[in-house]
Image (cartoon, coloured by chain):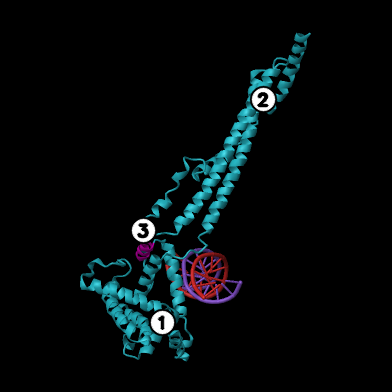
Chain colours: A cyan, B purple, C red
DNA sequence: CTTCATGATTGATG
DNA sequence: CATCAATCATGAAG
């Protein structure tokens, strides 16, 4: 009785298998999965060990002892990434384990049933393939959501640059020094920007941003910046004197070779002016406030000679010219009509 | 909390 | 493309 039933089942089987054949090969397009895999590998989620992260942070260690803020965000980023990584790996492992368990379970079941009904090894294989396929789609979903998480993290990290972090003391120091020692023409060349960026431990575009902001804000109300102008003028003055005494061959800052050949004279001019500003800085507050204007005026004279005819005029006249005509024309429209306005704002500060 | 300082972004300009 | 001007968004200070 039993063999007869078995043979009948076999016959039925033959028929059904034929109909199933067509459906068998579903051929999942793995292009997507490949992309995801590549991305995960590129992001370091599925790659080697977690403490091997990308190069940029290593580059950040350019000049010794510049405590950059980037490291904080980098570590934050890495922490989040490794978290994602951990979850991803644990989930992946879980899925794989479940997959193999389920497969063996099904195989055992089929083997057991093969005693009572006809099951070819090929069929078992097909079954296993189907199971693997199902689990791989689950894995793909896992990978996809991991990718999304990484992308979100990454975009947030990139957005973090919008979140302002104040520059280090060193950076502002360097930038201000350059700015106030080139007050007449605070447009650093590309090389100068790179130099400043290196010294301050910031990027070139950050230097550009800073100078853009500084120029416009300085022009907007100079009075507010007189104090720090004097401070940095004095600072560079000390620097310059020490340099001038020795040799100016090895100037400590701004090679400025590429920026303009006319800067040849500028060094001596700077030192001269800065010395003046230093001396008068302590003597009279009013003089101090004017000094930076004098500074830039002298610069203009030395560099361009544009204002040769006006040099002899009174102080505030030159100051006004400087204020209006220095970098571009523009700003301080009230200065001509109301002469008291411009310096007035200065002495309202009356710090010293 | 508000206010100010300040780095970054955006749009216009030449 | 560099710069200016306005604006945004946040950090720090009060």
Disc 3 chain ID: A
Q: CA distance from mark 2 to mark 3?
A: 62 Å
Q: CA distance from mark 1 to mark 3?
A: 41 Å
Location of mark 1 (residue): A325
Quadrant (top left, top right, bottom left, bottom right) of the C terminus of chain A: bottom left
Marks 1/3 in contact by CB < 8 Å: the verdict is: no
Mark 2 neighbour density, 10 Å: few (under 14) some (14–19) many (20 or more): some
Image quadrant assignment for residue A250: bottom left
The mark closer to the camera, 2 or 1, is 2
Location of mark 2 (residue): A106
Please say if A287 is above or below A262.
below
The mark closer to the camera, 2 or 3, is 3
Choose the circle earlier in sequence order: 1 or 3.
3
Choose the circle earlier in sequence order: 2 or 3.
3
| Residue ID at (36%, 71%) | A177
Quadrant (top left, top right, bottom left, bottom right) of the N terminus of chain A: top right
Disc 2 chain ID: A
- Considering the whole magenta stretch, tell me its main secondary structure: helix
Report x, y in % for residue A241.
Answer: 25, 74
Q: Secondary structure at mark 1?
A: helix
Choose the circle earlier in sequence order: 2 or 1.
2
Give the residue furthest to the left.
A246
Span shown in magenta: A191-200
Residue A32 among those drawn in magenta: no
Disc 1 chain ID: A
Q: Secondary structure at mark 2?
A: helix
Location of mark 3 (residue): A65
Q: Nearer the viewer, residue A335 or A309?
A: A335
Report x, y in % for residue A278.
Answer: 31, 80
Please say if A43 is above or below A185.
above
């Amino acid at each position: 009785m039993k063999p007869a039933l078995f043979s009948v089942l076999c016959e039925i089987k033959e028929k059904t298998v034929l109909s199933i054949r067509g459906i068998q090969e579903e051929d999942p397009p793995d292009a997507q999965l490949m992309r995801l895999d590549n991305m995960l590998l590129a992001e370091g989620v599925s790659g080697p060990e977690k403490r091997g992260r990308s190069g940029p942070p290593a580059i950040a260690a350019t000049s010794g002892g510049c405590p950059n803020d980037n490291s904080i965000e980098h570590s934050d980023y890495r922490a989040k990434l490794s978290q994602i990584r951990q979850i991803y790996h644990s989930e992946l492992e879980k899925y794989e384990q479940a997959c193999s368990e389920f497969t063996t379970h099904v195989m055992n079941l089929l083997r057991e049933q093969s005693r009572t009904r006809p099951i070819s090894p090929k069929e078992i294989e097909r079954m296993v393939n189907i199971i693997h396929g199902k689990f791989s789609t689950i894995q793909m979903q896992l990978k996809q959501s991991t990718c999304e998480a990484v992308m979100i993290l990454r975009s947030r990290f990139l957005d973090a640059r919008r979140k302002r972090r104040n520059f280090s003391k060193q950076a502002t120091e360097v930038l201000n020094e350059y700015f106030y020692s080139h007050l007449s023409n605070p447009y650093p060349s590309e090389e100068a920007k790179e130099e400043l960026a290196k010294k301050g431990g910031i990027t070139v575009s950050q230097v550009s941003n800073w100078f853009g902001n500084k120029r416009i804000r300085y022009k907007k109300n100079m009075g507010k910046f007189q104090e720090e102008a004097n401070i940095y003028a004095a600072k560079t003055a000390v620097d310059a004197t020490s340099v001038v005494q020795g040799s100016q061959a090895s100037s400590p800052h701004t090679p400025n070779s590429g920026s303009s050949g006319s800067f040849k004279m500028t060094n001596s001019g700077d030192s001269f002016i800065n010395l003046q500003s230093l001396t008068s800085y302590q003597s009279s507050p009013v003089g101090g406030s004017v000094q930076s204007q004098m500074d830039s005026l002298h610069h203009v004279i030395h560099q361009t000679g544009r204002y040769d005819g006006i040099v002899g005029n009174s102080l505030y006249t030159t100051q006004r010219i400087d204020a209006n005509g220095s970098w571009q024309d523009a700003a301080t429209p009230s200065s001509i009509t109301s002469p008291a306005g411009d310096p007035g704002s200065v002495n309202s500060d009356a710090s010293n």
